[in-house]
Image: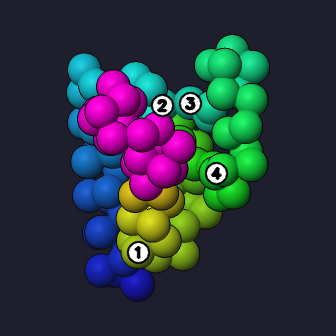
């Protein structure tokens, strides 16, 4: 339990730094298919995730382990690469 707490604390620090990165802005909030003109987003991405949601879940203690946190954080970027083709600016940032 102590190790998990330590890992989640480190995850919080790493996530904070990641969210401040100049290229992180597309990943900080849930995708809005209307505003972002990607109306088929939820047909392609069946498990949406973003760094803001990851941060909220982490702050609320909703991750039972460090590995659950990692899965959600990685899903954010996997989804971006799944939806946006190689060469697209968002795919490149992911």
Which residue is denoted by mark 3 in the rendering? Answer: 29
Tell me: 42 left or right of 67: right
Q: Earlier in the sequence, mark 4 or mark 3?
A: 3
What residue appears at the point 62 percent right and 31 percent down from the top-left corner? 31
Q: Earlier in the sequence, mark 4 or mark 1?
A: 4
Which numbered mark, 3 or 1, is in the foreground of this view?
Answer: 3
What residue appears at the point 74 percent right and 49 percent down from the top-left corner? 43
Tell me: 37 left or right of 81: right
Answer yes or no: do the residues labelled 2 and 1 have beta carbons within 8 Å?
no
Which residue is denoted by mark 1 in the rendering? Answer: 67
Image position, residue 73 (x, y; %): 42, 54
Answer yes or no: do the residues labelled 4 and 3 have beta carbons within 8 Å?
no
- In the image, residue 76 above or below residue 40: below
Tell me: 42 left or right of 63: right
Q: Earlier in the sequence, mark 2 or mark 1?
A: 2
Which of 74/62 is in front? 74
SS majority, magenta: helix
Marks 3/1: CA distance? 21 Å
Marks 4/1: CA distance? 21 Å
Quadrant of image for the C terminus: top left
Q: Secondary structure at mark 4?
A: loop
Q: Residues within 10 Å of mark 1 (few under 14, many from 20)?
A: some
Q: Secondary structure at mark 1?
A: helix
Image position, residue 75 (x, y; %): 48, 57
Q: Residue furthest bottom?
A: 1
Q: Which residues are magenta?
A: 76-94
Which residue is denoted by mark 4 in the rendering? Answer: 45
């Amino acid at each position: 339990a102590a190790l998990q707490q330590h890992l989640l604390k480190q995850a919080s620090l790493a996530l904070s730094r990641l969210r401040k990165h100049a290229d992180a802005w597309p990943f900080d909030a849930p995708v809005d298919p209307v505003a972002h003109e990607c109306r088929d987003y939820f047909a392609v991405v069946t498990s949406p995730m973003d760094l803001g949601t990851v941060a909220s879940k982490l702050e609320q203690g909703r991750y039972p382990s460090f590995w659950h946190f990692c899965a959600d954080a990685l899903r954010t970027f996997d989804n971006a690469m799944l939806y946006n083709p190689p060469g697209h600016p968002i795919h490149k940032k992911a």
